[in-house]
Image (cartoon, helix red, strand yellow):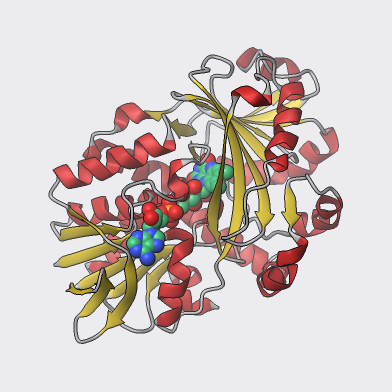
């Protein structure tokens, strides 16, 4: 079949590989090129053990506290609050115990596919050298929170049986640069990170081209559901048997025009990278309750996190980056001053129930969606590709896709 993939971010290129595996003729269309969007600057974690939807009772309890701190892990710009309100109301509804439990189960099923599908994709695409299986560490500076999370660790163990609880001294044996304030943690020995998310996305794109995919640089203005689906790009119409929309946050207007009004919102995230600084930490570290992570990328140390609701157009506010950088300096020895870093802001394409959209459009069975991966697009890209290829081939899907349907909203 001829398949057009819209978007050369990590989700689009992973989809392209899965479709190439089945022998389809794949054309990737992007208005810029590979890794032009959020996939260029994320934290690089293949976070297979992250099984909690962001929309959770835990977050709901903490939102008032977060919002009182203008530079805390979560912020809503006052000028954007009204626009964000419908999404926030849905987010709050998804965070109630019943929906949360259902969403957590669906997320678990998807996350359980992450490690195997990434391994398979990396091997086929010849990019294994860019995947580092050095594990990950979640560290706690609050004993009560750690105790409260214990039942949840057991569920994570179903994804990675080697997961181990570690005390303060063990944490520092693993990561000597970590402050004594961290008294407990979770070691995820099989978690991986990529050499650099931009490098990885570009490498996967180039490998898709080497495997026979073609690339068209064009802005897609519309997707049309005729007898055969087509896209309008650069004043031209391009038909295909299947069209896969994987344009991250920018998928929203294209899906909406097809009748699927997915409440997609940008959760803006920030990071600061210190080029060429390696050796400070060996594995990805997540600082529980502080809303940021540290990643030992091959291209340098990266500190990334924070969530800000302010829409697509507002200028970045790197006071947020300064705030977590300041914290990181007290959490980790060897973090350089702010001025020597390179800052970045990106748009997490987020649904209010923290589940991506993977499935068919309502307009045409040959128009498919793969967007809305929020905090975990890199992580879930290969698993999403597998599911899309199964849908295209009308094979049974590896997991039930009902919770991921665009028509759930
Ligand atoms: C600070 C931060 C840290 C993160 N850390 C992690 C992490 O450690 N692990 C993880 O799994 N995820 C992480 N994420 C999330 C992850 O980056 C995203 O979920 C992921 O990059 C989304 O990928 P995508 O392919 O859907 O979208 P994008 O990467 O945004 O790609 C969309 C592409 O579509 C193209 N496009 C858009 N509109 C059109 C159009 N009309 N016509 C043609 N082309 C178009 C764009 O040019 C772009 O190339 C993080 C995000 C942030 C912001």
Q: Is residue 251 visible?
A: yes
Looking at the image, residue 291 lies above or below residue 328: below
Q: Who is closer to the viewer here, 175 or 237? A: 237
Query: Residue sitting at 43 percent across and 32 percent down?
Result: 196
Residue 97: image location, x then y, percent: 73, 66
Q: Is residue 49 visible?
A: no
Q: Is residue 210 left or right of residue 356?
A: left
Residue 395: image location, x then y, percent: 25, 67
Residue 194: image location, x then y, percent: 42, 33
Q: Who is closer to the viewer here, 354 or 119? A: 354
Q: Is residue 338 left or right of residue 182?
A: left
- Label count reads 0
Query: Which quadrant of the structure image shows residue 239?
Result: bottom left
Looking at the image, residue 336 lies above or below residue 397: above
Query: Which quadrant of the structure image shows residue 24?
Result: bottom left
Looking at the image, residue 296 lies above or below residue 59: above
Q: Who is closer to the viewer here, 317 or 123? A: 317
Q: Quadrant of the N terminus?
A: bottom left
Q: Quadrant of the C terminus?
A: bottom right
Q: Is residue 211 left or right of residue 45?
A: left
Query: Residue sitting at 27 percent across and 74 percent down?
Result: 232
Query: Residue sitting at 76 percent across and 30 percent down?
Result: 327
Q: Who is closer to the viewer here, 353 or 273? A: 273
Query: Residue sitting at 38 percent across and 46 percent down?
Result: 35
Query: Which quadrant of the structure image shows residue 225?
Result: bottom left
Looking at the image, residue 167 lies above or below residue 400: above
């Amino acid at each position: 079949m001829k398949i057009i993939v819209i978007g050369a971010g990590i989700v689009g290129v992973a989809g392209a590989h899965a479709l190439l595996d089945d022998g389809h003729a794949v054309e990737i269309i992007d208005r810029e090129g590979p890794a032009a969007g959020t996939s260029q600057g994320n934290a690089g974690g293949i976070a297979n053990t992250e099984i909690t939807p962001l929309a959770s009772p835990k977050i709901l309890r903490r939102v008032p506290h977060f919002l009182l701190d203008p530079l805390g892990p979560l912020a809503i710009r006052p000028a954007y609050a009204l626009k964000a309100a419908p999404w926030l109301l849905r987010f709050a509804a998804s965070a109630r115990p019943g929906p949360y439990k259902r969403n957590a189960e669906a997320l678990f099923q998807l996350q359980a596919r992450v490690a195997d599908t990434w391994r398979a994709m990396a091997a086929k695409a010849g990019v294994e050298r860019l995947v580092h299986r050095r594990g990950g560490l979640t560290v706690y500076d609050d004993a009560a929170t750690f105790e409260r999370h214990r039942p949840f660790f057991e569920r994570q163990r179903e994804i990675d049986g080697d997961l181990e609880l570690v005390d303060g001294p063990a944490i520092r044996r693993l990561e000597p640069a970590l402050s004594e304030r961290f008294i407990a943690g979770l070691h995820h020995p099989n978690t991986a990170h990529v050499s650099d998310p931009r490098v990885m996305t570009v490498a996967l794109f180039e490998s898709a081209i080497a495997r026979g995919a073609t690339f068209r640089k064009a802005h897609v203005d519309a997707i049309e559901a005729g007898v055969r689906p087509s896209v309008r790009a650069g004043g031209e119409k391009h038909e295909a048997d299947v069209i896969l929309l994987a344009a991250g946050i920018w998928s929203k207007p294209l899906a909406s025009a097809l009748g699927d009004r997915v409440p997609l919102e940008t959760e803006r995230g920030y990071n600061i990278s210190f080029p060429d600084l390696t050796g400070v930490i060996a594995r990805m570290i997540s600082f529980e309750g502080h809303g940021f992570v540290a990643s030992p990328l091959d291209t340098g140390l990266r500190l990334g996190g924070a969530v800000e609701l302010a829409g697509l157009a507002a200028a970045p506010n790197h006071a947020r980056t300064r705030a977590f950088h300041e914290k990181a300096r007290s959490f980790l020895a060897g973090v350089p001053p702010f001025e020597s870093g390179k800052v970045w802001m990106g748009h997490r394409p987020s649904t209010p129930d923290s589940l991506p959209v993977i499935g068919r459009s309502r307009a045409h069975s040959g128009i498919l969606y793969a967007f809305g991966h929020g905090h975990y697009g890199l992580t879930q890209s290969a698993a999403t590709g597998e599911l899309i290829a199964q849908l295209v081939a009308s094979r049974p899907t590896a997991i039930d896709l009902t919770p991921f349907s665009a028509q759930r909203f």
